[in-house]
Structures are given as C-alpha cells and as structure tokens.
Image (spheres, coloured by chain):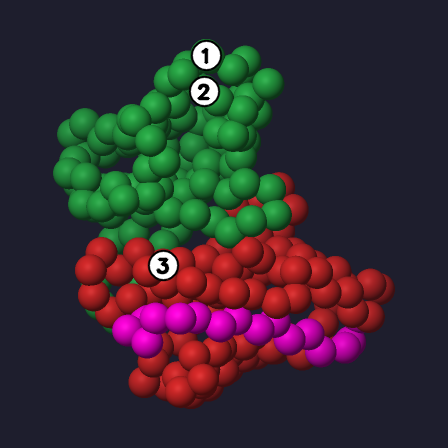
Amino acid sequence: GENVEQHPSTLSVQEGDSAVIKCTYSDSASNYFPWYKQELGKRPQLIIDIRSNVGEKKDQRIAVTLNKTAKHFSLHITETQPEDSAVYFCAASPSGGSYIPTFGRGTSLIVHP
Amino acid sequence: EAGVTQFPSHSVIEKGQTVTLRCDPISGHDNLYWYRRVMGKEIKFLLHFVKESKQDESGMPNNRFLAERTGGTYSTLKVQPAELEDSGVYFCASSQTAGAGGYEQYFGPGTRLTVT
C-alpha cells in the first residue's frame, strides 16, 4: 500500500518568513495530492491540491510543487502570518482501487508575530 | 450549506464500555468516510461508504468496530467493547464524487474519544 512521509513534524517561523513542508510517497500510481489545514479545535480543510499532470500550482501565498520522478511534493507558504498557524496534512491518492487518500503525520506550523 | 457534523464532540468512557459515534454528511454526498487520528500520528482511513453500501472497510482495526449507514444518510460507528488503544480523534468526511483524478473530501470536526 501507499506510504506517505511528512517532514518536519514541527516548524516554527517568524511572521513574514516562508515555510516549506515536504512529503514523499511510495506508490507511483498515486495521482492526486491534497493538502489539508487544521486550525486548533477546528476541522481539517482542503487548502490546495495538485494532480500528477501538473508540476506546480499557486494560490495567493500558498503553492504546491510535485516531482513525480522523485515521488515527493511540497507545500510552500510565503509571507507567513499568525493565522497560518495550524497543523498541515499532506495526502496521496491512488489512481485506482478505492481512491482512498493516505495521509502524512502532519506538521505543526507555528508563526510567531 | 451545512457542513459535515459529528456527535458527540467528546466522549470519555471506561475500558469495556460501548460508544457510538454519529456522522451527518453534507446533504447529497453519496460518499462517506471514517478516519481516526491517534495523537501525533497520521489520519488513518477506517471505512468508506457509497450510499448505504460499504465500499472499502480495509482500515477497520478489528471486529470491535461496526459502522452502519442505513438509508444512505447519516452513519454511526460503534466501538464495543472499547479498549485503551481506541482512544483518538475520529473524523468523518464526505464527498460528492469519488474516483480517479482526485476529489475534495469535506471533514467533520471530529469526535475525541478517550478510553480510560
């Protein structure tokens, strides 16, 4: 089955800095890679996703890159703000079977004002 | 539009007791998923319903866990009898579609289960 590794487990940055969270996956058949953000006490919410036919996708201050050959994908947050503080989960979904995503362990991002 | 709701938000039970968690998906979403997150670990898949049918239950840990979705609307997840290792946050999610190419899942707020 799929295995997703996510690093770092904790990331502390100063407001205005950039933050990068990296994930690797094992199943070359995975073709959909969503990122979820879970603020304290709230539900996980999709913030950005990327499909395997695309190498990069941006949405304002967040971007995701995908390297299919190396089987890794990353979340980039620029100009971080205190409200970006949350736990971020990456996931990889296969192109067949039941299409169930496999999640990483999460990264706790802390943005200091 | 109301999001995915879960009840209760917290549950503290003793080992050996029974607990039933409920999930109400977004109206019209045929796909309903159950996940569990043990502290500090990944969100782990338990089960997937399509309407009232179990599409994939490969993540269910053992036969102490029973999920149902009668009528294809809300779903329940019963743990009987509960063990200490069942503690964690149980998430429910729903989606309108499922399949190759990816799709967004909408998560509920989770039920924090503590077994003492």
Residue A35 locus on image (x, y percent): 48, 65
Q: Which amino acid, by three-letter code, is at mark 1? A: Gln
Label ID, residue B9? none
Q: Which residue is drawn at 37% across and 18% down?
A: B80
SS at circle 2? loop
Q: Is residue A17 shown in magenta? A: yes
Label ID, residue B17? 1
- Can residue B76 be seen here? The reply is no
Q: Do the residues labelled 1 and 3 touch (CB within 8 Å)?
A: no
The N terminus of chain A appears in which quarter of the rendering? bottom left
Disc nearer the start of the sequence (2/1) = 1
Q: Residue at x 34, y 71 (%)?
A: A27
Q: Are marks 2 and 1 in contact (CB under 8 Å)?
A: yes
Q: Residue at x 19, y 39 (%)?
A: B54
Mark 1–mark 3 Cα distance, whole angstroms, equals: 31 Å
Q: From the image, tell me which residue sits under label 3.
A: A101
Q: Which amino acid, by three-letter code, is at mark 2? A: Ala
Q: Which amino acid, by three-letter code, is at mark 3? A: Pro
Mark 2–mark 3 Cα distance, whole angstroms, equals: 26 Å
> Color of chain A here?
red
Q: Is residue B47 above or below residue B20?
A: below
Residue B43 locus on image (x, y percent): 47, 49
Q: From the image, tell me which residue sits under label 2.
A: B82
Quick check: A69 left or right of B13?
left
Which stretch appears magenta? A15-32
Q: In this view, does A103 lie above or below B77?
A: below
